Image (cartoon, rainbow, N blue to C red):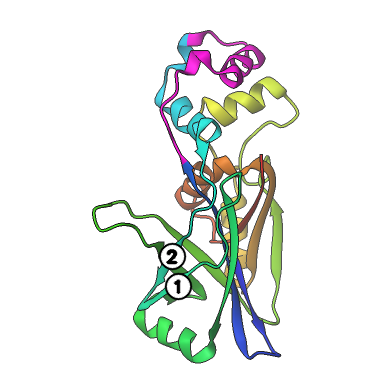
């Protein structure tokens, strides 16, 4: 997500966006969504018995968790998000930091190249690390707003069967030449915002693709599905 400088309050306004869900194990063959996907993709049931499909479908079949209070850790600061997760598990919370607090986080290494990194505060016995990042956008500058499907990621939107197979059965792959083009714009000082009709449940494989293909960091804006 993004943060912006607010002149009136002389502070940085941050947004933290996410979803809380329980990725319970389901009997895939009994799920209507899975049966419909298999029918649309025209593949045998055996093709769904793979790690890629299980990972991709898991966020779609998970249980959303409502009313959860979240805390994040940013460097030496610990902040409670003022909004609980909604019925669909999603939350969007805002908080402000002064320039002095931002300068301190830069010294601590929590902000690097205008990107703030934070972690979810979990229980003492929970060893998971769930993290996110917020991009500090300068009051003046240049932004590149880009589509994702068939712009930076090979999707084949014009062919429904191929679109579904590329989404649920195959490793994501980048469009040739686009990573180098985006890096050139990044060296010229641009910020990036990736906008897609793809559902938010694909954020993890999308992030992995962008990192693997060496695209510059940017904010993601995906559809709530």
Q: Which residues are magenta?
A: 22-45
Note whether residue 125 is visible: yes
Q: Is residue 123 left or right of residue 146?
A: left
Q: Which residue is at the front of the view, 156 or 61?
A: 61
**Contact (Cβ within 8 Å) of mark 1 with mark 2:** yes
Q: Which mark is residue 218?
A: none
* Residue 2, quarter of the rendered image: bottom right
In the rendered image, which residue does mark 1 sit on? 79
On the image, the x and y values in percent for residue 212 come to 45, 48
Residue 1, quarter of the rendered image: bottom right
Front residue of 93/219: it is: 93
Left or right side of 92 for 120: left
The residue at 49%/54% (across/down) is 68
Q: Is residue 95 above or below residue 19?
A: below
Q: Quick check: 189 above or below 215?
A: below
Q: Secondary structure at mark 2?
A: strand
Q: Give the residue at x 45% y 72%.
A: 79
**Can you tell which mark lies on residue 71?**
2
Q: Position of residue 89 (x, y in %)?
A: 56, 47
Residue 135 is one of the magenta-drawn residues:
no
Left or right: 110 in relation to 3: left
């Amino acid at each position: 997500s993004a943060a912006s400088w607010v002149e009136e309050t002389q502070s940085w306004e941050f947004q933290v966006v996410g979803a809380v869900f329980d990725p319970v194990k389901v009997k895939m063959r009994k799920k209507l969504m899975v049966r419909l996907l298999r029918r649309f993709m025209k593949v045998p049931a055996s093709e769904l018995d793979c790690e890629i499909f299980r990972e991709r479908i898991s966020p779609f079949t998970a249980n959303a968790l409502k009313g959860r209070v979240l805390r994040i850790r940013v460097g030496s600061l610990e902040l409670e998000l003022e909004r609980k997760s909604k019925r669909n598990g999603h939350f969007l919370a805002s908080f402000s930091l002064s320039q002095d607090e931002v300068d301190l986080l830069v010294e601590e290494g929590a902000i690097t190249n205008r990107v703030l990194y934070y972690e979810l505060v979990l229980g003492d016995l929970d060893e998971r690390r769930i993290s996110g990042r917020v991009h500090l956008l300068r009051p003046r500058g240049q932004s590149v707003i880009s589509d994702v499907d068939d712009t930076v990621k090979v999707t084949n939107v014009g062919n429904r069967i191929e679109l579904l197979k590329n989404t649920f059965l195959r490793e994501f792959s980048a469009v040739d030449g686009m990573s180098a083009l985006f890096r050139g714009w990044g060296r010229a000082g641009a910020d990036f915002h990736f906008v897609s009709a793809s559902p938010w449940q694909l954020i993890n494989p999308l992030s992995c693709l962008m990192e693997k293909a060496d695209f510059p960091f940017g904010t993601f804006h995906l559809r709530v599905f």
